[in-house]
Amino acid sequence: MNPYILAILLFGLGLGTTITFASSHWLLAWMGLEMNTLAIIPLMAQHHHPRAVEATTKYFLTQAAAAATLLFASVTNAWLMGQWEIQQITHPLPSTMITLALALKIGLAPLHAWLPEVLQGLDLTTGLILSTWQKLAPFALILQLQPSNSTLLIILGLTSTLIGGWGGLNQTQLRKILAYSSIAHLGWMILVLQFSPSITLLTLLTYLIMTFSTFLVFKLNKSTNINTLATSWAKAPALTALTPLILLSLGGLPPLTGFMPKWLILQELAKQGLAPTATLAALSALLSLYFYLRLSYAMTLTISPNNLTGSTPWRLPSSQLTYPLATSTAMAICLLPLTPAISALLTS
């Protein structure tokens, strides 16, 4: 892609998100979300592969449906309550419609079906943008809405953690596994949103770091399915040794960074008297952990050529920048000891 066009599209992505962050009026927030969608569509379809075009079409249709619902709900709210302020949504009907529209935008279950299919059709770089940056603007709006729909948010959160765990169990494609991982993590964030928005933001931040690191590892190895992971030791042995730690951090195992948000969320849910919800969420984390362990096994404990049909790749030096990968990997593995400091910051 022409670097000038790429720069304009990335600027559009940044501007759309910033407009949504800065807006207090529903029309302006909707405009930011639309700019975001329109900026990423050419990036998704840039390879002109039928699979990429199909994924782009699916993404456009779902985002357009969510944006139309959001606009309809905000107009309904203006008609019923006479104001357009984002934080003044008090009527239950527009509040529920807006929550569901934003859930569709970020891919929360049961409105998640588009996300694995779309992510599977994209290259890893665009998939990374879709899994990280594109979640920020809708999430900012959900955070501002949060006090009004407690039961709906808990149902969305629990459904997402369960479907995110179950859906990834028999997948062999890494991008689909990462999509289900994204759904499960978003479920954890939504569960605790109404009780502690600061823990939600911490969970979002750790999810962004771990996902960024995972996508960069797969991009460096040019891996798109489990079979190709088995040949990665020949390309980058040190990274292959560290990758299971990143994956287990995504699964939420101590003593890795990913354990911190899950620990704080379960603690907060227990404080709020929601022990059954916390138990279900913790059990659903075991489902996710299974497929992260599966990836770790395929990567480090199988030696190519093995019984998986993996073709040995050329050992060419990678042109990818290693500083972002090194930084994000260190953060994805080593931040758990900072939990007391982070907790103190959250409560202050």
Image (tube, rainbow, N blue to C red):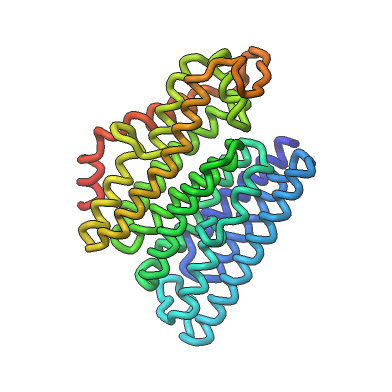
Q: Position of residue 331 (x, y in %)?
A: 38, 31
Q: Position of residue 245 (x, y in %)?
A: 40, 28
Q: Quadrant of residue 273?
A: bottom left
Total residue callouts: 0
- Give the residue displayed 37% in from the left and 47% down from the top: 203
Q: Quadrant of the N terminus?
A: top right
Judge from the rendering whether residue 324 lies leftward or rightward of residue 42; answer left or right. left
Judge from the rendering whether residue 105 lies leftward or rightward of residue 261; answer left or right. right
- Give the residue displayed 29% in from the left and 58% down from the top: 196
Q: Position of residue 157 (x, y in %)?
A: 42, 59
Judge from the rendering whether residue 193 lies leftward or rightward of residue 168; answer left or right. left
- Give the residue displayed 64% in from the left and 55% down from the top: 37
- Give the residue displayed 53% in from the left and 61% down from the top: 110
Judge from the rendering whether residue 317 lies leftward or rightward of residue 200; answer left or right. right
Q: Position of residue 200 (x, y in %)?
A: 36, 53
Who is closer to the viewer here, 138 or 35?
138
